[in-house]
């Protein structure tokens, strides 16, 4: 399975349901038959190689929360509006949305962040060409290596389990924000998992994580009555992945 790029579709005169045609609607018109009439067979998208078929598409939308708020909406409302439009155009169409996260102050165009987070092949290839040589590892302190999914404490690898690293990464990606226990459970444990914890056992998971952070355990802070928060110290280094981490919207 792979992605193909659709970046220049020709306009058609077929209007959206309930709207007047303006000539700006971009869909794929039917190719004429030998007699000049429109063919009833669907037209193949030029980007789709022989032996494959188009099963859907990804529309990368670059909008940060500030832009959405300035426009009098929010990301959730935009997503729901696009879902309604898809259902209106193609009844029964299935949709799935995710939101792309990046470190605060990372810069760059919003749409490029989204493309990288969702593993767009062209964006990944461009990023690989731009990535500079990695900086040397610090000799002391904590290194949270998102790309390799490991934690170094004073140069030694901490024996975190997969779930413990997921928990730490979840908090790191929300640096400075207090996360309640129910949000941690809903995000890191799928519904129906045999080992889905309750809010009390989340405390046990956090305690185990802290014990493996040793002298740096206070980077994971307890906010009494509210939840947990990641606080970065001067001796904490974060190695980001080559692509920002997407979280389920």
Image (cartoon, rainbow, N blue to C red):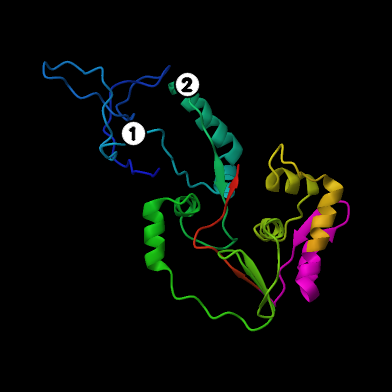
Q: Nearer the viewer, mark 2 or mark 1?
A: 1
Q: Residue at x 70, y 71 (%)?
A: 158
Judging by the rendered image, the residue that carries numbered circle 1 is 53
Q: Single out the residue that lies furthest toward the bottom.
A: 139
Q: Is residue 53 left or right of residue 216?
A: left
State the image coordinates of residue 216 (x, y, percent, origin top left): 77, 73
Q: Quadrant of the N terminus?
A: top left
Q: Residue furthest left?
A: 35
Image side of residue 180 versus residue 9, left or right:
right
Dot 2 or dot 1: first in sequence order is 1
Q: Examine the rendering and report whether any part of residue 203 can be seen.
A: yes
Screen quadrant of the C terminus:
top right
> Percent position (x, y) of residue 20?
36, 19
Q: Which residue is mark 2?
A: 88
Helix, strand or loop at disc 2?
Answer: helix
Q: Residue at x 36, y 34 (%)?
A: 54
Residue 123 location, quadrant: bottom left
Q: Residue at x 55, y 64 (%)?
A: 147
In the image, 123 versus 17, the foreground residue is: 123
Residue 149: where, in percent of width, then height? 61, 63
Q: Between residues 177 and 202, which one lies in front from this camera angle? A: 202
Crowdedness near tag 1: few (<14), some (14–19) or many (≥20) residues, C-alpha within 10 Å: few
Question: How far apart, in angstroms, are the residues tagged by discs 2 and 1?
Answer: 23 Å
> What are the residue bounds of the magenta stretch?
209-236
Q: Position of residue 21 (x, y in %)?
A: 33, 21
Left or right of 176: which side holds 129?
left
């Amino acid at each position: 399975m792979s992605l193909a790029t659709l970046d220049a579709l020709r306009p058609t005169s077929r209007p959206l349901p309930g709207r007047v045609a303006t000539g700006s609607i971009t869909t794929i018109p039917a190719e004429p038959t030998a007699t000049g009439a429109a063919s009833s067979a669907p037209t193949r998208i030029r980007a789709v190689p022989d032996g494959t078929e188009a099963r859907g598409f990804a529309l990368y939308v670059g909008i940060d929360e500030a832009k959405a708020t300035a426009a009098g909406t929010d990301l959730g409302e935009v997503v729901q509006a696009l879902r309604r439009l898809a259902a209106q155009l193609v009844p029964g169409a299935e949709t799935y949305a995710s939101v792309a996260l990046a470190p605060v102050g990372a810069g760059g165009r919003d749409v490029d962040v989204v493309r990288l987070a969702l593993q767009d092949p062209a964006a990944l290839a461009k990023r690989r060409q731009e990535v500079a040589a990695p900086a040397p590892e610090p000799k002391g302190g904590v290194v949270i290596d998102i790309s390799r999914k490991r934690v170094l404490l004073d140069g030694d690898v901490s024996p975190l389990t997969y779930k413990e690293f997921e928990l730490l990464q979840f908090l790191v990606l929300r640096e400075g924000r207090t996360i309640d226990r129910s949000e941690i459970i809903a995000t890191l444990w799928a519904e129906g998992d045999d080992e889905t914890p309750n809010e009390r056992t989340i405390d046990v998971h956090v305690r185990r994580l802290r014990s493996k952070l040793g002298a740096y355990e206070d980077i994971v802070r307890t906010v009494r009555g509210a939840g947990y928060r990641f606080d970065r110290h001067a001796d904490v280094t974060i190695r980001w992945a080559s692509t920002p981490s997407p979280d389920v919207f």
